[in-house]
Amino acid sequence: MLLCRYLCISMKQVVQFQDLGKMEYRQAWDLQEKLLKQALASKAAGQPTSHHLLLVEHPPVYTLGKSGKMEHVLIDQQEMQKRQIGFYHSNRGGDITFHGPGQIVGYPIFDLECFYTDIGRYLRELEEVIILTLADYGLVGQRSKGETGVWLDPESPLQARKICAMGVRCSRWVTMHGFALNVHPDLSYFDNIVPCGIANKSVTSMQRETALAIDMEQVKQKLLHHFEAVFDISIAASANVG
C-alpha cells in the first residue's frame, strides 16, 4: 500500500477525459458515483486509482447542496414542472445553484492522495483553472474571501458578480462534483434562487461580460490546457468511462 502511494505521488498523473455532451443531471451523478466507487475499491485493494475529468452540459436543473436551505429556492415544484426544470438534493457541498445549456459543468474524480491531502488547496486550484481560462478572454476572475468559486469585482458590494460556482464531495480523498462555468446560459434562471445562498450579489456569464459570441468547444479546450498546467497532469481522451 505504501509503495503504491509512493509511486502514485512521484509520477505525473494521467487523467482520463470525456466530454459527455448534453446529459441529464441524475445520469451524470450516477456516473460519478460509479467512478468514485471504482477508485475506492482500488484503494482498498492497494491498487493504483484512475483519475477522470468529465465535462457536460445539463438540461435546466436546480441542485441543493448538503448545507443548502430550501428558503433559497424561490420557485415551487409546480412551477418547476411547468417550466421543465429539474430539482435535486445533491450530496456535494454548498447551497443552491443552477445548471443549464450554455454552462460548462466539470466533474473531476481525482484521488487527491496522488496529489496532496488538502481539500482547501484542491478548491483553490480548481479556482485557478477557471481564473486562467477567463484571462484568455480578457476577464479578471478573482476569489472572494470566505466564498468558494470565481467572481468578478468581488471587493465591490455593488458590482460583485459570480461567474463560476463550485461544490465538491470528497470520500477517502477521492473527489466528485466540481464547478459550473457560465459561458452563455440563460441567466434568468438564477432569478428563481438565491445563488449559492449569497444574497445581494449577482450572477454573470462570459458572454455578458465580453459581449462576444463565445465558442463552447474553445472554452473546453482552454479548460483542459489549464487543468494540465495547474494540477501538473497529463490529460488523455477517453471514448468511454465507467
Image (cartoon, grey):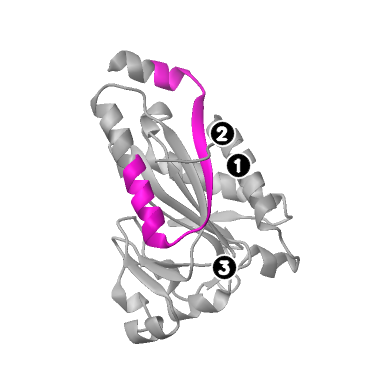
Q: Is residue 233 above or below residue 37?
A: above
Q: Is residue 72 above or below residue 163?
A: below
Which x, y percent locates residue 215?
A: 70, 58
Which residue in the structure is indicated by mark 2? 235
Q: Residue at x 31, y 78 (%)?
A: 71
Q: Is residue 30 visible?
A: yes
Q: Which residues are magenta?
A: 7-35
Q: Is residue 169 visible?
A: no
Which residue in the structure is indicated by mark 1? 224
Q: Residues within 10 Å of mark 3 (few under 14, many from 20)?
A: some
Which x, y percent locates residue 179?
A: 48, 54
Identified by mark 2, the residue type is Ile
Magenta stretch contains residue 136: no
| Mark nearer the N terminus (2 vs 1) | 1
Q: Residues within 10 Å of mark 2 (few under 14, many from 20)?
A: some
Which residue in the structure is indicated by mark 3? 161
| Mark nearer the N terminus (3 vs 1) | 3
